[in-house]
Image (cartoon, rainbow, N blue to C red):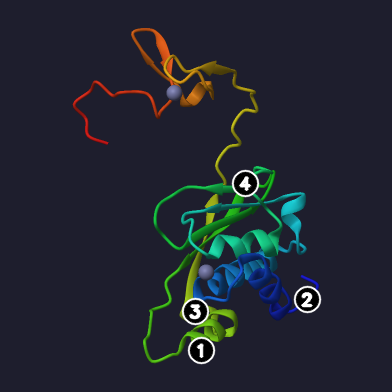
Amino acid sequence: MRHEIDFYWNESVAFHGHACPGLALGCRVAFDAARMLGVDERCGDEEGVCIAETDACGIDAIQSVWGCTMGKGNLLLKPRGKQAFTFYRRGEPEGIRIYWNAPRSDERTREERIEHYLKGPAEELYRTARVAVPAPAAARISPSLSCSACGERTAEPMVRLLEGHPYCLDCFEDPSRILR
Ligand SMILES: [Zn+2]
Ligand SMILES: [Zn+2]
């Protein structure tokens, strides 16, 4: 990392549009993960990948610090409702999962919380574990099928079949008794 965390914090706020504790935790984990993995800033442009288990504010800081985006395929969302993020370098078997478990103390103001999240001792904020990196999905271009109801072209893995006809998820009426 070429800069101190304040540099990335300012960039994250500019990207996200406001300063908030959730953004600060994303900035901190992205910053610390880069140091732990020994990668440079903006490594997401080339080799860095993040799997985020939340879609809250923090992932904007991760995009800003690491330069990884959903469009490039190196920011992956695995919605679990947890403030947890796995970072790894493409091609390496292991990465680091950071689980944010800082207690939400009401003694701190919003500004103090942001400061604590950015610069407080790591052991008060999160825990880390080495984790195996998921095997890369085989690169295939899936064909699109036209939905039998709305006619819109829909990628094959998202299509449901009813009596042999393809439907997009918005048009598919689930005949099963399973409530989703
Ligand atoms: Zn926010
Ligand atoms: Zn449709």
Disc number placed over residue 152 in the picture, else none: none
- x then y, percent, for residue 121: 54, 84
| Element class at badge 3 | helix
Q: Which mark is residue 123?
A: 3
Kindly identify the amino acid type of the residue bearing the numbered disc 2: His
Mark 4 and mark 1 residues within 8 Å of each other at the beta carbon: no
Q: Earlier in the sequence, mark 4 or mark 3?
A: 4
Mark 3 vs mark 1: which is more N-terminal? 1
- Foreground pick, 4 / 144: 144
Q: Nearer the viewer, mark 2 or mark 1?
A: 1
The reply to whether dot 2 and dot 1 touch (C-beta < 8 Å) is: no
> Mark 2 or mark 4: which comes first in sequence?
2
**Is 139 situated above or below 106?**
above
71, above or below 139, in the image: below
Q: Which residue is mark 1?
A: 112
Farthest residue to the bottom: give it: 107
Q: Amino acid at mark 1?
A: Glu
Q: Residue furthest right?
A: 2
- How crowded is the residue under tag 1: few (<14 C-alpha within 10 Å), some, or many (20+)? few
The residue carrying mark 4 is 70
Q: Residue 98: horizontal and vertical position, in percent?
A: 52, 64
Please name which of the two marks, 4 or 3, marks the residue nearer to the observer.
4
- Taking the spot 39% from the left edge, 56% from the top edge, the residue there is 81
Using the image, determine if residue 13 lies above or below residue 55: below
First in sequence, mark 2 or 1: give its number. 2
Ligand 2, seen in the image, is in the quarter at top left
Whole-Å distance between the Cαs marked 4 and 3? 30 Å
Residue that appears at 56% across and 74% down = 24
On the image, the x and y values in percent for residue 83 come to 45, 63
What is the secondary structure assignment of the residue under circle 1?
Answer: helix
Write down the residue under mark 2. Answer: 3
